[in-house]
Image: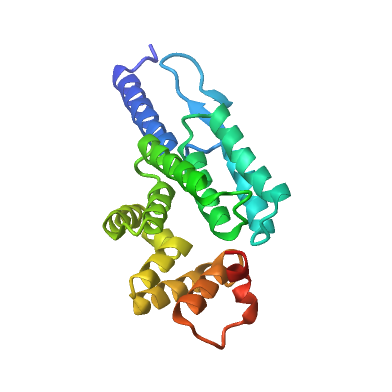
Amino acid sequence: VDWVPMDESAVRERKRLMKKQLAKYYQGEGREDRIIIEFPKYGRVKFYYNPQAEAVGLVSSASDLMGRTFPEVTKRYARTVVNTLERCIELHPSFAPAYAALAEVLLIYTACDETSCFPAGPSIIKAEKAAKKAIELDKNLWRGHLAAGALHCCRFNWKAAKKAFNAAMKIAPVETKASFYYIAYLEALGRRDEANECLNWRIALVGKGRFTWPILALLDYLRGEEGMDRGYSVLLDHS
């Protein structure tokens, strides 16, 4: 007596739309959520643990350790960062952010470390493979394109670097514009005004801590300018 066919149809349609939106969410910004919500065809709503949550934790742990210990590149910390990311890739081979993070870390450590720990040739090749894999797994991962652009710069392949940075810019313009690698790329091409603009943009977003001071050191070195805090030149002592 209480059954209204029109009402049941409306509920089914709302459920269908909800499932569609959830699928879209978990493919994008929600892919790193710890808990996944699922609406089965029949029965109650289900909640289960996201298998990628462990991968997110490992990448976050490695990034945090690097952020706290850089620019001092010691075997104790640097190898732990790299090993954590490699372990993440071994456990979760389809998790694209781990490959992008590994590419960035290898590039930074290779530029700043003694060659005995991160020899340039093997490390750069390894970083290139990681960046390529990140993009293969997720073409919308801006960090993958950013790492690829930086690596192209290492080989002075400016055309490929431009293409990679443009791809990153289309996906995440704010983050790309404020990144260490993009600012260094602009400076290397002599686009000083643009580099300054991006640097000011970065300082406004994240301040002068973290990886901002190495950018200032790089600009100081490339321009041969005086007047910047001499502490910024520590980076050059490790190169």
Residue placed at 38% from the left, 70% from the top? 188
**Residue 146 vertical placement versus 55 (above, below):** below
Of 230 and 9, which appears nearest the observer?
230
Tell me where residue 193 appears, x and y as whole percent.
35, 79
Q: How many marks?
A: 0
Residue for point 33% across, 18% down: 4
Residue occupying image coordinates x 57% and y 71%: 213
Quarter that holds the N terminus: top left
- Return the residue found at the far bottom: 227
The residue lying toward the viewer, choosing from 206 and 83, is 83
158 relative position to 229: left or right: left
Looking at the picture, does residue 193 appear above or below residue 84? Answer: below
Residue shown at 43% from the left, 67% from the top: 184
Residue 235 in percent (x, y) is at: 60, 68
The one nearer the camera, 11 or 48, is 48
| Residue at the right extreme, as displayed | 76
Residue 53: % across, % down: 58, 34
Dividing the picture into quadrants, the one containing residue 168 is bottom left
